[in-house]
Amino acid sequence: MAHVPKSMAASAPAIALPMARAEKKVDDRELVRLSQSGLESAFEELVKRHQHRIFALVSGILRRPDDVEDVAQQVFLKAYTGIRRFDQRAAFSTWLYKIAVNECWDYLRKRKVRPLVYEADLSEEQVSRLDGIISADRPAEGANARTETRELLDRMLSSLPEQDRQLLVLKEIEGFSVQELAKILDLNANTVKVRLFRARGRIMDAYRRRLASANSANPGAAAQKKG
Amino acid sequence: METNLGLGTACDKYEALLEDYLQAELSGAEQQTVTDHLKRCDRCLSALEQAKVSVRLLQLGEPAADPGPGFSRNVMARIHAAQAEKTVERGSFWPRFILLGWRFAATATLALGILVTYDVGWARHAASSAVTARAGVSDIFAPDPAAAPASRDEVLMMVAESSHGQN
């Protein structure tokens, strides 16, 4: 169990963060400083500010919706216990993202699981439907169609090497920038760009292979589409 | 037309630039460099087209939703629970040592008792053995008072005689 700062013990009274401070006017550095001095409400404000990005990051790495909340909570618990040692040389968000990445890997290692992997490949019909959506360049309509499209995409992504899948999900689905990814993954920004571009090529290779096999299984539909 | 030895991939030198081109994050000069290269390199052009489709494909994915206000409350509750657990752990730290101390003291007392009992028993045994030895054995090994030399000169004489006898 990690060390819990004395001033943050359970018996310490929870001091309310003044309303003016709780607003965005107070930057993360100040909130970190206040958290380090034992102000719980300052840490809670940090949680509120970063919970969405941490959820996105954990979700992007694990792709196991059932476990995301638990791991995200664990990330903030680790951050709380270690905040006194955080020297603020890096941004709080960067420090938090690194905790999140480590926590995800710990989780996957302990559970001995790979991020969600689908056993069965896509059917020809599913590939054709996916291709129809991409070619039309408009999202699927209706909740069921959207759910199915997401599942098809997840299946495509699960066929990629782990690093490619994570990069693509974090960049294109969860909206992390190249610079953020470089900091999170301890890589050079140029390396992230190269890996991203190659990952794009790999997912398209996988997609084209499935599409080709779907078309060969159903040549009539393919010809009709071309026509 | 430039040649590219990769299998369906872009030129190594242009991969990072093509990613920036895709995201429209190039400066004017860089943009021109890439545009000129794309006119001459089919593979980079094809890789770029595929990358554009990948963007459309990945846009079908749904980002994680904001967990909502309940999340921060749950986090703080978990922190408090962890702290309470820690306090209990800290409270049960010393009693464990005290118990260990008592056990050690009991063991030491027992060992000391055994040692003292053994020592007393051995002392008694030794004393009775000494009495027996004095009673039975002393007569055999004690020197005859009549044969004992009376003075220093007699001792020297006895030594001289015995050495004579040996020669």
Image (spheres, rainbow, N blue to C red):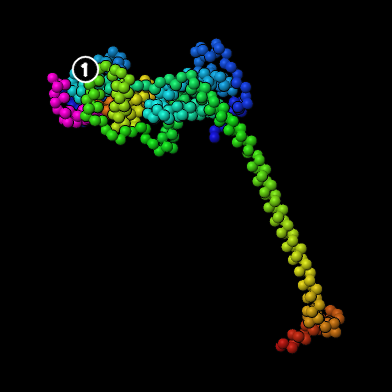
The residue at 48%/27% (across/down) is A73
> Is residue A85 shown to the viewer in this render?
no
Magenta span includes B66: no
Would residue A196 appear left or right of A186 to someone viewing this image? left
Q: Which residue is mark 1?
A: B36
Look at the picture and state if A33 lies above or below B95.
Answer: above
Which element type, helix, strand or loop, lies under badge 1? helix
The number of numbered badges drawn on the structure is 1
Q: Position of residue B53 (x, y in %)?
A: 25, 21
**Residue type marked 1:** Asp
The residue at 38%/26% (across/down) is A60
Q: Position of residue A173 (x, y in %)?
A: 34, 22
Which corner quadrant of the image does residue B43 belong to?
top left
Chain letter for mark 1, please: B
The residue at 72%/59% (across/down) is B115
Q: Range of the magenta residues?
A: A205-227
| Main SS, magenta residues | helix
Q: Quadrant of the N terminus of chain B?
A: top left
